[in-house]
Amino acid sequence: LLDELDECTQSGDREKCFRLYAQISAEYEKKNLTDLQKLYQQKMLDEAEAILKKDKVRGSVLEAEALQRLATTYMVEGKVDSALHDAHLAYQVAPLDTLDFRAQTLLLLAQIHLMNEDGDSVLHYTDEATRICPRIAETDLYRITHAYGLSLQGRYDEMMELLPDYISQSSIYSQAELMRLLMYRHEDTQQWKDAYDCAVSLMDMTDSIARGETSENMVRIHALQHERQMEHQRAEREAERARLFVVIIVTLLLLLIASVAGLSYRRKARIAHAKEL
């Protein structure tokens, strides 16, 4: 990705740079490399703001993507009003045939309203998302958002019916989040044995996640070593290009000096010859 980014930066392809910054930021977030993640996220946001200033992107997927990225960033930063504003705009400008994107944006709106504990709005947007793109109900993000929305509305029976299936269908990280929600509900209803069983399951999931992350960290170390090697190679290429540029300039200067000297010599020779005549 970094090599590809170098190429599109040199070519001035801002649309591609924007998407690559977003991908690289996401990759660094997975690796828990916060500084690098924030660096590329800021680059992505700068590109997004630059893109939104262009008239030719109005009503395009690119404009919608830029707005969605800004809304997501504002949500993470806790700027709920700004997040809602840009998420609504992203949905409004997205072409009607981009059903996946529009459903994802509706789900983003549900997540933002979850921060305000507005259960009605959460479920409104999750329902709208599944209406225009039913397969989004198969994602972990939908399951967690929908379950919490039901909880906020006090629809605990529905939530409790859905959670076992949601947990069995989700990734380990989402399973832990949903198991935690289930445990809290059992605690609220003083079903202590069920709460205890959930706590044990949650502990097992947490241990599994920790073991997986230990293994992933080894992979990350190797990946980081590779990335550093790539960075070193890029720096060497830049240095080589700089040296080549200097050599070219010096060569051109020498040729220019030689050319001027040659002209001067020929001029003096002509003058001397004219005097002899």
Image (cartoon, rainbow, N blue to C red):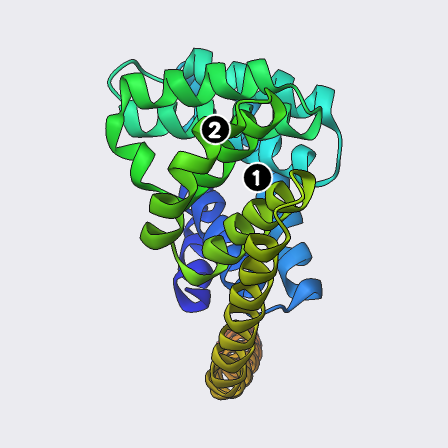
Asked if 68 appears above or below 205 in the picture, the reply is above
Give the residue displayed 46% in from the left and 48% down from the top.
17
Judging from the image, what secondary structure is the residue with disc 2 in?
Answer: helix
Asked if 244 appears above or below 153 in the picture, the reply is below
From the top left corner, tell me how far across and down residue 126 is, in percent: 43, 23
From the top left corner, tell me how far across and down residue 110 is, in percent: 53, 25
Which numbered mark, 2 or 1, is in the foreground of this view?
A: 2
Residue in front for this viewpoint, 146 or 151: 151
Give the residue displayed 50% in from the left and 88% down from the top.
218
Q: Is residue 233 left or right of residue 127?
A: right
User: Tag 2: residue type?
Assistant: Asp
Crowding at label 1, few (<14), some or many (≥20) Cα neighbours within 10 Å? many
Give the residue displayed 51% in from the left and 74% down from the top.
252
User: Tag 1: residue type?
Assistant: Glu
Q: Residue 235 has which mark?
A: none
Residue in front for this viewpoint, 235 or 26: 26
Report which residue position mark 2 lands on. 157
Q: Is residue 70 left or right of residue 167?
A: right
Report which residue position mark 1 lands on. 47
Judging from the image, what secondary structure is the residue with disc 1 in?
Answer: helix
Q: Are marks 2 and 1 in contact (CB under 8 Å)?
A: no
From the top left corner, tell me how far across and down residue 103 is, in percent: 37, 25
Residue in front for this viewpoint, 200 or 56: 200
Q: Residue 268: tell me if it is visible.
A: no
In the figure, residue 268 lies in which quadrant? bottom right
Q: Residue 143: tell me if it is visible.
A: yes
